[in-house]
Amino acid sequence: MTEIENTALIMIDWQQGFADLDYWGQRNNPDAEANGARLLAHWRAKGAPVIHVHHDSTTPTSRLYPDHPGHAFIDFATPADDEAVYGKQVNSAFIGTALEDDLRARGISRIVCCGISTDHCVNTTTRMAANLGFEVTIVSDACFAFERRLPDGRVFDADLVHDVALASLNGEFAKVCTTDQMIGGKCD
């Protein structure tokens, strides 16, 4: 089995509902979608496995509730007919889905993650994948985060949230690299 066959790109929660900044707050990395599109195009051109994950909120007022227009994938991340799609109701793409079993059945041992948001679903999916024994890479500039607030009123800007989430994963749960590094084969 080749590296192409045993490495899957997992596109996490590239959904229209995350564009509502009045709802979610300020975000970082305005180039995340363009980098995600480049990464996806590269993966498809290689003929390597692509997997899409979307969040299926159980809260009817959520932008990610299945009946809400925000539940839909953003244009660049619309799955092709031959690409697997998993719906999840929690942060990890491995909980309540057949993702792990399907990856193992296909002989996939390495995954590359990108998506929304760096500190929630990308983070949780990465940690769980690593704990399950998969080799994980996160493409840092094909992800973004939102600002976060503590109950005491302190606000942490989205760049800080994004960077700290990546730093906490790098070296223990995943390798972190950029889109250019991944496409150029220099993500070591």
Image (cartoon, rainbow, N blue to C red):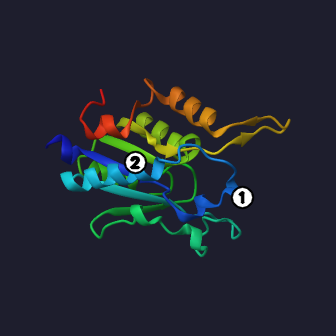
Residue 10 screen position, x and y as percent:
38, 50
Examine the rendered structure and indicate whether residue 111 appears above or below residue 44: above
At x 52%, y 26%, the residue is 167
Residue 49: in sight, yes or no? no
Q: Which of marks 1 and 2 is nearer the N terminus?
A: 1
Residue 6: percent from the left, percent from the top?
23, 44
What type is the residue that disc 1 sits on?
A: Asp
- Left or right, residue 131 beside residue 159: left
Name the residue nearer the viewer: 58 or 4: 4
User: Label 2: which residue?
Assistant: 35
Report the residue at 45% width, 53% height from top: 33
SS class, disc 1: helix
Could you say which disc has been placed on residue 22 in the image?
1
Q: Is residue 169 left or right of residue 102?
A: right
Q: Position of residue 32 (x, y in %)?
A: 47, 48
Nearer the observer, 85 or 15: 15
Q: Distance between the residues labelled 1 and 2?
A: 24 Å
Callout 2 crowding tier (Cα within 10 Å): few <14, some 14–19, many ≥20: many
Identify the amino acid type marked 2: Asn
